[in-house]
Amino acid sequence: MALLDFLDKRKKDSQAEMSFIDHLEELRWHLIRSVIALLIGAIIVFSFTSFVVDTVLFGPTRADFISAKWLCSLGHAIGIGDTLCFQQVDAKFLETTMTGQFVASFTLAFIGGFILAFPYIFWELWRFVSPALSDKERRTTRGVIFWVSLLFFIGVAFGYFILTPFMVNFYFNYKLSDQVTIMPTFSDYLENLIYTTVGIGLLFQMPLLMAVLARVGIVTAKFLRKYRRHAFVLIVIAAAIITPSTDPFSLTIVAIPLYLLFEASIVLAARINKKQKAKEDEEWS
């Protein structure tokens, strides 16, 4: 009997090991397909490098940028004149290395490819994770791919159309002395643009993440309110990570929308908690 028990245990261990290997193999193929999607997106962006650089990349540096026009028109409409109008800036960028522009073109292609392929990449990740969820958790996370993608693109658009033009206009018009000429490097501008688009897009997932955690009972609105001050500190740290130049203006312009997202998360969690309590009361009655 002891021998049979030992052999049975060895058999179960072998099956568990094969199951683990199968999971690794499945994860590998999910990652491979995600990388292929990213490469396809990168190739598409690289094929239109001139348009992407001249129109998309440097668009926020121009006074006739689309969001600059909208903000200026809004200022006139609400009676505050040119307060929201951006001043014309002569944005010129240096490149101090021979390979700088060559490397930047590939960086821009891969970042653009990631943005284009984001919904598919998240879908592949969700396909790998979802089998481990319970039926209740799957029901509470229906439509997650759509909402995650939507929040990501809203965050990217907010960073590109609002944050980046404000930052460029502020820094190029802020001068300590007329003897100082602002001439940042191209790499510095590209790095800031990546942080204020992709970084903001990822952080815009906060309300959805909190809503999911509230649905599965991990966090509550009461918990979020209790640790609101702690969350504010974490948001400031996240804003400092997103903006390589940790000056007060950059931190403020990034931290404010992130904190508003946290407050929105509290509202969503409160609604979810209220529905859950009503359902529990109905079951007990």
Image: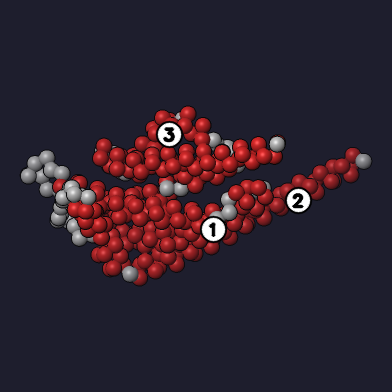
Given the image, on which type of amino acid does mark 1 rest?
Trp
Nearer-the-camera pick, 91 or 157: 157
Nearer-the-camera pick, 93 or 214: 214
Viewer-nearest of discs 3 and 2 = 3
Q: Mark 1 and mark 2 in contact (Cβ < 8 Å)?
A: no
Q: Mark 1 and mark 3 in contact (Cβ < 8 Å)?
A: no
x then y, percent, for residue 7: 85, 46
Q: How is the image coloured?
A: secondary structure
Horizontal arrangement in the rendering, residue 9 relative to residue 217 (left or right): right
The crowding category of the residue bearing disc 1, from other C-alpha atoms within 10 Å (few below 14, some 14 to 19, many at least 20), is some
Given the image, on which type of amino acid does mark 3 rest?
Ala
Identify the secondary structure beneath mark 2: helix
Residue at image mark 3: 231
- Picture quarter containing residue 27? bottom right
Q: Is residue 253 visible?
A: yes
Given the image, on which type of amino acid does mark 2 rest?
Gln
Upstream in the sequence, badge 2 or badge 1? 2
Question: What is the quadrant of the C terminus in the image?
Answer: top right
Residue at image mark 1: 123
